[in-house]
Structure formats: C-alpha cells, structure tokens
Image (cartoon, grey):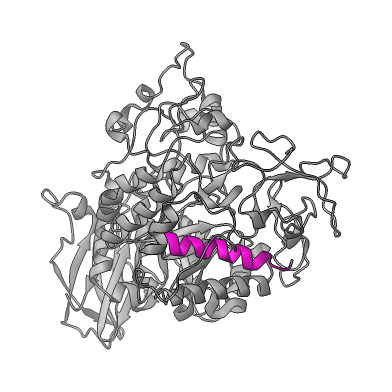
Amino acid sequence: MNFIRDTLSRPRPPSVRRSVQLPRRVTYYPSPVDWRDEVIYFLLVDRFSDGQEETRPLLDRRYLAAARPTLPNGEPWRWDRWAVSGGERFQGGTLRGVVSKLGYLHRLGVTTLWLSPVCKQRGHLNTYHGYAIQDFLDVDPRFGTRQDLVDLVSAAHEQGMRVLLDIVFQHSGPNWRYPPDVPGGAEMPRYTTGRYPFGSWLDATGAPLLGVPDVDDAAWPDEMRNVGYYTRAGAGDLGAGDLNDPAAEHKRSDFFTLRDIDLDAPGALTDMALCYKYWIALTDCDGFRLDTLKHVSFEQARNFCGTIKEFAANLGKTNFFLVGEVAGGDFAATRYLDALERNLNAALDIGEMRLALSDVAKGLAPARAYFDGFVPGLAIMGSHRNLGSRHISILDDHDHVFGAKLRFSTDVMAQHQAAVAAALQLFTLGIPCIYYGTEQALGGPELSERRWLPEWGRADRYLREAMFGPLHPRASERAGLDPQARDGSLPGFGPFGTAGSHCFDERFPVYVRIAALSALRAAYPVLRHGRQYLRPISNFNQPFAFPPAGEIIAWSRILDDEEALCVINPHGVAARGGDVVVDAALNRPGDMLTIILNTAQSADPLGYVGPHPVGQRLPVRERNGASYVEIRNLPPAETLVLTNRP
C-alpha cells in the first residue's frame, strides 16, 4: 500500500500531526466476524525467540544441571546472577524471531498473536518489557525495525493469523525529571493533588538535556514534548481512590518513574490516538491490548477507544479488537466494560477468575469455584452470553497481579497438567489466551534449587523466562543497542533456570495436547459458541451432584441440537470416573455419544491402549429421570470430548 511503502521509505516522522497523512477508505486485512473463534497467544518479544535456535541445542529436561554452564571467567553457575539477568537485562528476542516461529504457533492452533509493546524505549535503560516508551512512532532497535514489524504482521496474515499490539497511551517512559527540590526528589517525588513544576528533559544517557533533542533524547514525536501533556503529580498509590472518580489518585499518579499523561490536556488524547492510528495504518494490525486502562477515566477511555474504532472501520477493519487490562479484579473490569460499551470489546480475566481457573485445573478447588463465574446472578462479569464474548481467559501472564508470581506449571503433579487448564480455557465461554511457554510447562528451576532465588514467587522475572535460551543477555543500557554486545558476566535467562538451550519442543506432552484441543475447537462451532452447563456427576450410584475438588469435571456446550460433553480429570496422579449427566431432551436412553477427543491418545496416537479411545460410542442411560453416560478410569490430567453429532 502507498502509505506503508512511503512511510517506510523515510525516517520515522518527527511529528504525528504535521508529518503523517493517514490513509482512509483503503482495503486492509479484514477483522474476524467473531473474536470467540480465535485462540490468542501472548508473548514478550524479548523473551520469545531470536530466530537463532538452530545454533543451540534443544533443552534436555532430564539433565537441567548440564545446561547451567560456567561463565567465561570460570566462575561457576550462580542463581543470583541468573536472577539478575532475568530482571535487569534484555535477553535478545526480536520481531524476526517471532516470524521464525509462526509455523510452531500455527501448529499449536494459535490464530492471533498478542505482542508485548514494541515502541522504542530509552536506550540507557533495560526496560525489556516495553512499557516505558521514549518514541511513540518507532520500534525499539533491540526488537528490530518498523519494516520488521510490518513484515511480521504480513507473514502472520499469510498464515491466517492476526496480530494484536500491546499499546501504552496513559503514560510514557522516564523521559524527563522533576525539579531537584520537589518533595521526594526529581526521579519519583511524593504524590500531590496539585501539579509540580516541570524539571528537565533527559538526553540519550539519562542526563539533563542541553540544546535541541536528537532522536534518542527526550520524547518523540514532537507533540510529546509538550510539558502540558503530563500530569506532573508525582508517584502515589496506584490503588488509591474511587474507581468512578476521574481525579482519583490512581488515575493521576505516575507509575513509579513512568510519567503519567494528562489526557484531559488540550490535544493530548488526540495526539496519542494519532500515534496509534499511525501504527494501524503502517502495520495492518488487527487490534490493541490497552495497558493500564483502569488508570484513565471512563470518559478518556471512551473517547480514545471510540476514535480508534472509527479510524479502523474506515480501513475496513469493522471489528478492530480492543481489549483492556483493568487491574483490581473482576468488579473493576466489569465497570469499564459497562462504561465503554461497544467501544471496548473485552477485558482480560486477570482477577479472581484466573486464580479459580488455576486451582480447579490442579484439583485444588471444586468445579463450581470456576464455573460459578459464568452463572447469571453470580458472575461478577455479567451473564454467560456477555462473558462469552467479552472476557479473555488467562491462566498465566507476565504480571500475575493476583496471587503468587509463579507460572501454573511451577508446582504440578503431572508434567502435562497445564493441558487440563488449557482445556478449560479452550472449551468454556470466552476467548482463550495462552501465555508463551505454557505449552512447554515453563515454571522455573526444580524445587531443590528455588531456595537460592531472590524473591522467588514475588518478582515478575520468574514469569518471563527466555524460551530461546540465550547463553548470555544483551549488554546493559546503551551498550546493549549493539546486537552483538553481550554481558558475559551473566548467564542468559533461559528456561527452567538454564542458559544456552532452547525449549521449542513440538513433541512435548503439553504442546501435543494443546494442539489437539485447539484443532478440535476449530472444527466444532459448538465448542466456541454453544451455551454452557456444568454437569452433575454420580459415583457408586450416589445422587447426582457437582463434584468436589480433585474429581472429574464435566460440562456441556450446546448449539441447537448438538451437545459436546467435555470431561477433564484434574487429579495429577490418580484415574477418575463417574456417571455424567447429559441433556435429556437431546439424548434419550439408548442413544449414543461418540468420543471425538482423548488427549492421552493424542499424545500416543499409535500405542494408546487405555479407556475411551476416539471413535468409541457410549450409550446414554437413564436413572431417576436423568440421562447420563459412564466415564471410567480417565487417566490423570487428561481430557475427553464426546458429542451426539460426530
């Protein structure tokens, strides 16, 4: 397209108002009809792939100690150095690396990629996560170039996959300082209900800027150097104040050293929206994940989302996806969904439901702890029909704002137990999202080694292992802008507490099972759009009842006359079974339900000899007016799916 070609032929535009002529009424890649048909995969660009995995061995998980090399100076492996690497260095993942793994993701069943923020960061900082932006119109050189991002989206589209960009419109990086005499100091002064004076812009090294800014100095585009665009209230309590109050402390506070943007300042919201319209037009992306949405007012969020939606529609993207990160639990997410209405598609399910999903999938909580979150009258996030299209199911993510900062697979009884959680995500109401590495059961080092790790379970770094297994991280700060410069004093923050080995293993038990689950979801609309019912279960001819923790869990999805019965065994070491209720109007005694998925068989397609193989037909029986089928000896951490319409 002319806009893309012309924009990439020139340096990054200096001004979003004066230098960018956005297109309109041009055909771009269309939106999906219904985002419930998608399977999202969230990855941190720095921690996913550098595209050089062929230069490293596949990690042998049986011998993790062998993948913990000594450092070049002969110093033995040290856990504190591995932890420093993970928390304070770029590891070297790139946009081209993501492109190299599109086949891996496609075979897993992924249909939409969600990329962590890729905008340019301050070169003198190690903000590998991407949330501290210096230039809102350029890609961070440690990730690649604007061309690389355009190529990634294009390559994804060629495989039928869509791309969501993680965007930050509420704050910027620490591109300036307060005056040195403000209470608390120039970097992170104490919160004020008023407004502090502006201090000084920072140059490329983090020192006060003298003279005209170059591309690595201050903030870009030009509009973002309007000091009136910043709230300048200092760093306060990010949870303080009423959610409905547009002037609440949590809506005006800096994010520690990240500078809050005053979206009520004349022109500020318009210019931020123009920056992200530029990225839609340049990359042909399919949606945005909106960072820290709770920290803008309802009116600001409505206006920003509304103008983004309208611009995308003018490019033919009539269902451009906007999903909000709303910290503070399910109630806060619901308030933003209600307030923004059609301007916000969905919210991330990062509150109480994420914890319930994890506990139920591990057999630590009864099924109703999760399924009650879908029941009208009980669900904080609304009725089952609303919830089905307006929430993104999350098991793991990069923050874990609720609960311990440990991945699901850190402590599981069965190696492939994450596939049980994935079955709950993929086959219950909502839009499923898989966090990178969940399919490889990432979860840090073995139990015996965790005692050496600082802040184990409390630091974000342990949610962010580098799947591609760099031997060393990038050099620190500006030296790391050279892709060849490595910090030889630190090991790479590789998977399971290793360095120098990758874990892109398509034969791994969790990967194989999730791929089978995703393929079935794609083949059967009932599993994406059907109504949902948790099923009572009976053991030893006892009355039908909802199961306690650790017993099999069954639920039906019903679409017209079609019923898909999903059954999981969340127990990690023991087989489980029971008599499972099905819909009596659709399934009369003597009718048959057919097994269409058995994850144990998916993992061993040639040698499987266990119960309930694919193709087996189970008769519907009747007891006390209830229709049911008999499930027996379902192995630990496995999933079955049956249907009356195979």
Viewer-proximal residue, 70 or 622?
70
Is residue 278 a member of the stretch shown in magenta? yes
Main SS class of the magenta portion in the image: helix
Q: Is residue 520 above or below residue 200?
A: below
Q: Residue at x 59, y 77 (%)?
A: 340
Q: What is the x, y in percent for residue 363?
A: 42, 55
Quadrant occupied by the C terminus: bottom left
Q: Is residue 630 left or right of residue 37?
A: left
Q: What is the x, y in percent for residue 58?
A: 28, 33
Quarter of the figure with residue 563: bottom left
Q: Is residue 59 above or below residue 354?
A: above
Q: What is the x, y in percent for residue 526?
A: 29, 76
Q: Is residue 560 above or below residue 361?
A: below
The magenta segment is 266-285
Q: Is residue 381 visible?
A: no
Q: What is the x, y in percent for residue 380?
A: 57, 73
Q: Residue furthest top?
A: 74
Quadrant occupied by the N terminus: bottom left
Q: Is residue 26 left or right of residue 512?
A: right
Is residue 167 a member of the stretch shown in magenta? no
Viewer-proximal residue, 168 or 225?
225
Q: Residue furthest left?
A: 606
Q: Is residue 584 above or below residue 37?
A: below
Q: Is residue 294 visible?
A: yes
Viewer-proximal residue, 632 or 198?
198
Q: Residue at x 44, y 14 (%)?
A: 72
Please count the marks in the image: 0
Quarter of the figure with residue 550: bottom left
Q: Residue at x 39, y 39 (%)?
A: 467
Q: Residue at x 18, y 54 (%)?
A: 601
